[in-house]
Image (tube, rainbow, N blue to C red):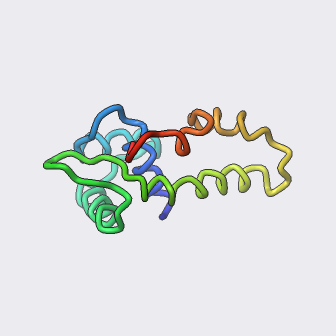
Amino acid sequence: MTAFELAIFVCVFRSRSPMLVEEIRRAVGRWFERSIPRDIMAETIGHMIGRGWLIKNKDRIRASVQGREVARPLMNGIIRMLDQGTRLLDVALMMSLLQLTKGELDSAPGGH
């Protein structure tokens, strides 16, 4: 999973309801502070659906359990990358800085 795909996954995972591709595109674009081309977003989401990380239901997208399992160690890796492997940073603080609640990817029921 690339950093861009991780951002898409986290965006969809955090949503209380399945999202339209355009909603995902706008939200991720705000995070990266740039407009994401529609074709790139559609292609990336299509790839993620093919990998089983996201699930399409009509015109809406939701997160899968498989995607959560892939994203979880990547979030841990981001924290370790930021603290340069020293483990001196408080993980709870870093999760807060990354705007994730502690255990968010671990505790969600089902695919969300």
Quick check: 81 left or right of 71?
Answer: right
Query: From what the image shows, is residue 41 above or below residue 98?
Result: below
Quick check: 41 left or right of 109?
Answer: left
Query: From what the image shows, is residue 21 above or below residue 47?
Result: above
Q: How many marks?
A: 0
Q: Please tell me which residue lies in front, 37 or 53.
A: 53
Residue sticking out furthest to the front: 110
Residue occupying image coordinates x 43% and y 40%: 109
Q: Position of residue 108 (x, y in %)?
A: 47, 39
Quick check: 34 left or right of 86?
Answer: left
Residue occupying image coordinates x 33% and y 51%: 36
Q: Please tell me which residue lies in front, 57 or 11.
A: 57
Residue sticking out furthest to the left: 58
Q: Position of residue 48 (x, y in %)?
A: 34, 62
Q: Position of residue 14 (x, y in %)?
A: 42, 37
| Quadrant into which the C terminus falls | top left
Residue occupying image coordinates x 73% and y 54%: 80
Query: From what the image shows, is residue 42 above or below residue 14?
Result: below
Q: Position of residue 38 (x, y in %)?
A: 24, 54
Q: Quadrant of residue 37?
A: bottom left
Q: Quadrant of residue 95?
A: top right
Residue occupying image coordinates x 27% and y 40%: 18
